[in-house]
Amino acid sequence: MELCTQTVATDEFIISRRAGNHHPTAWGDHFLVYADLPVANEEEEKKHEDLKEEVRKMLVMTPSKSLQKLDLINTIQRLGVAYHFEHEIEESLSYMYTHYQEWISEFDGNDLHAISLCFRLLRQQGYYVSCDAFRRLTDDQGNFKKELVNNVHGMLSLYEAAQYRVHGEVILDEALNFTITQLKLILPKLSDSQLAQQVNDALKFSIKDGIVRVETRKYISFYHENEVLRNFAKLDFNILQRLHKKELCEITR
């Protein structure tokens, strides 16, 4: 194929291109209907900003050295709105990391949820903390205490924490095997349908490798503890979804 020709009159090069034989997009015109879709109206923008500031105040006002702060950070992350509070979360977790040994020693030896959640949040944020705290959850033979299985929420937290193990952390390898085995045994006996769904989803999808927006959608559906947080997460999810639809519209044009 001749790509260019020279004209005597103008000394310009004319580029000749063959028309591309592109296949039609698999999406067709599906996303074009979102071209004029507003991401958020004025009322939604104001509500979103007001709720965001309320959540920010919760983060700032909750004592750093508390289980409440850990639970709040965990909830914010799982509701998919942590990107609004990166500075506040990093500041809190940095403080927790600095005081980790002192703080973890204050937890009750059987406080499975607190020890596991603190460990996971710090490892998740990139802070390397020792897994020795989990030895407090074992008996004289080095096995995890049998009574731990009665605390389903705690078992879930331990299961998620163990996913952040590194090579050579034998106790976390054992924790992972222990929690998987016990949660599978517990699951058919759970009368709380929402808790059963949580356990089932946790066993199917790793918290470490899960798709964030999919996990967010599921978590919003069963979270009801704090209305402000839930309303903010739902509104934020809907706004982001509209934004993504508009972006897909631009891509598929």
Image (cartoon, rainbow, N blue to C red):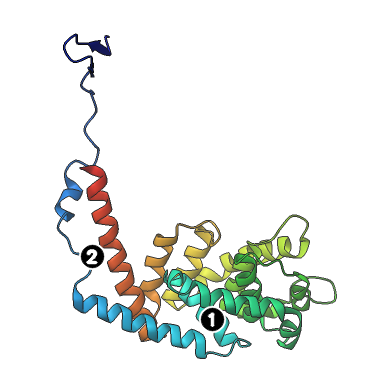
Q: Is residue 182 left or right of residue 106?
A: left
Q: In this rendered view, identify the residue nearer to me: 198 or 13.
A: 13
Q: Residue at x 36, y 74 (%)?
A: 233
Residue at the spot of label 1: 71
- Image location (x, y in percent) of residue 98: 71, 78
Q: Quadrant of residue 106?
A: bottom right
- Label 2, label 1: how far apart the Cα atoms are: 31 Å
Q: Is residue 31 above or below residue 214?
A: above
Q: Is residue 240 left or right of residue 110?
A: left
Closer to the camera: disc 2 or disc 1?
2
Q: Is residue 169 above or below residue 69?
A: above
> Which quadrant: the C terminus?
top left
Residue at the spot of label 2: 39
Q: Residue at x 52, y 74 (%)?
A: 87
Q: Is residue 108 left or right of residue 191?
A: right
Q: Quadrant of residue 93?
A: bottom right
> Which quadrant: the N terminus?
top left
Q: Is residue 154 visible?
A: no
Residue 206 numbered tag: none
What amino acid type should be assigned to the residue bearing mark 2?
Answer: Val
What amino acid type should be assigned to the residue bearing mark 1?
Answer: Asp
